[in-house]
Amino acid sequence: MLSTQFSSYRIDIVDAELYYVPNWLSQHDCVSSWYQQLADELAWQQDEIKVFGKLHRIPRLQAWYGDAEASYRYSGQSMQPRPWSSSLSRLRHALAHDQLVFNSVLANWYRDGHDKMGWHSDNEPELGRNPTIASISVGSSRTFQLKHRITSKRIDLELEDGSLLIMAGPMQHFWQHALPARKRISQGRINLTFRQVAQL
Ligand SMILES: O=C(O)CCC(=O)C(=O)O
Ligand SMILES: [Fe+2]
């Protein structure tokens, strides 16, 4: 159970099970080389999304990896996963060692503080009702913002190099999250959200 294993890392907010484990990666591996390794190894692409009929390049690079059956719709795009790369496979096994089991991962590369992600919830039907999502961050630390859909309560978390954030329970139903630009930051950050995707 998440709640017993990670209980000392729980962040106390309503309508969510949220855990933040700083330095999670260093328990499994040396952190310093992960950023460059993932930057070099993954097949990064800059996708486009349509907003009010107009195509825009999204303000970050992305890559989607997973088991063959884990195809997934993300912000209106249907994404076919690439087969696991060696780094991602190692990280998946490290998570499984902590009883966190996933069949896919979305990688996001924020090349500097101009890159960002807007408000959303990871509430696609493929993820199921109360999905557990494990989010690993490497590189520059960035602010992860939360906003409650009903009360509009706001919470900011600083996601540091080597950290693991676990989002679970009804969080995706009640809260949106975003990664705002931080224009003074020149260093990059890579975030990996491991997900369990069902075939619908
Ligand atoms: O970069 C982050 O920390 C957030 C990523 C995210 O929300 C997502 O991939 O859905
Ligand atoms: Fe998300």
Image: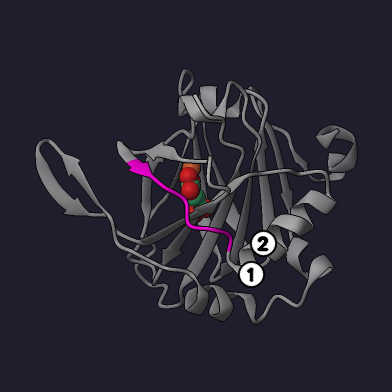
Residue annotated with mark 2? 89
Image position of 96 (left or right of 176): right
What percent of the width, then of the height, locates residue 196?
Answer: 61, 38
Q: Is residue 111 above or below residue 7?
A: below
SS type, badge 1: helix
Residue annotated with mark 1? 86
How is the rendered protein coloured? one colour
Observer-nearest of 153 and 90: 90
Residue type pointed to by label 1: Ser
Read off the magenta span: 78-84
Observer-nearest of 170 and 43: 43
* Mark 2 neighbour density, 10 Å: few (under 14) some (14–19) many (20 or more): some
Q: Which mark is residue 170?
A: none
Q: Main secondary structure of the magenta part?
A: loop
What percent of the width, then of the height, locates residue 133?
Answer: 62, 41
Please tell me which residue is depicted at 46% across the width and 73% down the height of the picture. Answer: 188
For the residues labelled 1 and 2, the Cα–Cα distance comes to 5 Å
Q: Residue furthest left?
A: 53
* Mark 1 neighbour density, 10 Å: few (under 14) some (14–19) many (20 or more): few
What percent of the width, then of the height, locates residue 159?
Answer: 60, 57
Q: Is residue 12 above or below residue 182?
A: above
User: Answer yes or no: do the residues labelled 1 and 2 have beta carbons within 8 Å?
Assistant: yes
Residue type pointed to by label 2: Ser
Image position of 25 (left or right of 40): right
SS type, badge 2: helix
Instruction: Indicate yes or no whether the magenta region holds residue 74.
Output: no
What percent of the width, then of the height, locates residue 167?
Answer: 64, 38
